[in-house]
């Protein structure tokens, strides 16, 4: 019997996390460490899908504020997520984990085109599925993509890895007295304007009764602890 509380999981990784301390690009040590953590979870019987951002390479929103056309900027950002997905796939397969990258933008030479039923079948066969290129549409964040894919594959939980160990009532970097929530409702997240994710992603999770765990990857083993149900982050219900 699996030690983990959840059977099927959608994990959202930001592009910045893949950069590590170098701030840009992909840090091999970071991505190899992530691959080892994911392998342990997969070996524990969890069906795991991953959505990865592209902020370590290109941020569409930032570029659009500097005058670039928003749609064009978002498309470039989507391509950045494909690069990260392929790098994560390579690290996972070196660790002995079978993976499939599914892209919302067709690029058959390097990735499968996203098909919901095929993604679910891969999960059932024990493969890790990495979703890339967002939704294939501009104006949607990778958080919204992750929430959408989690609902589509009938995930038991949506896990969002962040820089801090949960959701606080104010910015813990600026306010040392900030209080961390162990549990909070989606409605409170919206009304308190806590900015965990964009409102589209929050609404998708809330409408589909999908639990969200917000946690930090800075400490080794936090992902596994969160999946066991330990209090290592914030659960949004």
Image (spheres, rainbow, N blue to C red):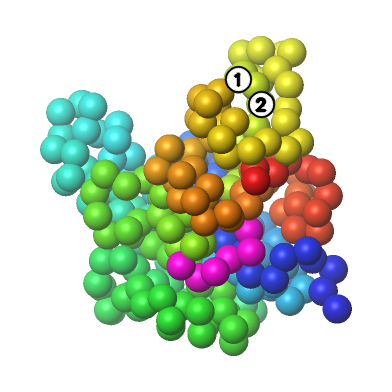
- Does 155 lie within the magenta span? yes
Does residue 24 sit above or below 156 in this rendering? above
List the residue tagged with mark 1.
171
Would residue 133 appear left or right of 211 to someone viewing this image? left
Q: Please indicate, yes or no, whether residue 29 appears anywhere in the rendered image.
A: no
Residue drawn at 36 percent across, 77 percent down: 115
Residue 119 as seen in the image, left or right of residue 65: right
Q: Nearer the viewer, residue 138 or 54?
A: 138
What SS does tag 2 mark? strand
Q: Is residue 190 above or below residue 26?
A: above
Identified at 16% across, 46% down, the residue is 72
Quadrant of the rendered structure where residue 1 is? Answer: bottom right
Q: Is residue 93 magenta?
A: no
Residue 30 in the image: above or below residue 167: below
Q: Position of residue 5 (x, y in %)?
A: 78, 64
Magenta residue span: 152-158
Residue found 50% across the figure and 70% down from its top = 153
Q: Is residue 177 above or below residue 214?
A: above
Quadrant for residue 187, please give it. top right
The spot of residue 81 in percent (x, y) is 38, 55
Residue at x 17%, y 45% (from the top left corner): 71
Dot 1: element? loop
Q: Would you say 202 lies left or right of 215 here?
A: left
In the foreground, 57 or 187: 187
**Residue for badge 2:** 168
Count of number-bearing discs:
2
């Amino acid at each position: 019997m699996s030690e983990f509380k959840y059977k099927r999981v959608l994990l959202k990784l930001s592009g910045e996390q893949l950069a590590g301390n170098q701030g840009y690009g992909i840090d091999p040590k970071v991505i190899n460490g992530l691959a080892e953590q994911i392998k342990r979870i997969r070996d524990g019987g969890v069906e795991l899908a991953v959505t990865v951002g592209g902020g370590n390479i290109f941020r569409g929103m930032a570029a659009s504020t500097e005058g670039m056309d928003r749609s064009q900027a978002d498309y470039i950002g989507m391509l950045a997520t494909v690069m990260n997905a392929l790098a994560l796939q390579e690290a996972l397969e070196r660790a002995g984990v079978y993976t499939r990258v599914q892209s919302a933008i067709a690029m058959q030479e390097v990735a499968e085109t996203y098909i919901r039923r095929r993604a679910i079948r891969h999960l059932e066969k024990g493969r890790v599925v990495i979703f890339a290129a967002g939704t294939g549409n501009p104006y949607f964040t990778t958080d919204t993509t992750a929430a959408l894919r989690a609902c589509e594959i009938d995930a038991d939980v949506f896990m969002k890895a962040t820089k801090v160990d949960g959701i606080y009532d104010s910015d813990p970097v600026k306010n040392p007295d900030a209080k961390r929530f162990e549990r909070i409702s989606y409605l409170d997240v919206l009304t308190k304007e806590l900015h965990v994710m964009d409102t589209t992603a929050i609404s998708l999770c809330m409408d589909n009764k999908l639990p969200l765990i917000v946690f930090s990857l800075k400490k080794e083993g936090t992902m596994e602890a969160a999946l066991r149900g330990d209090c290592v982050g914030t659960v949004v219900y």
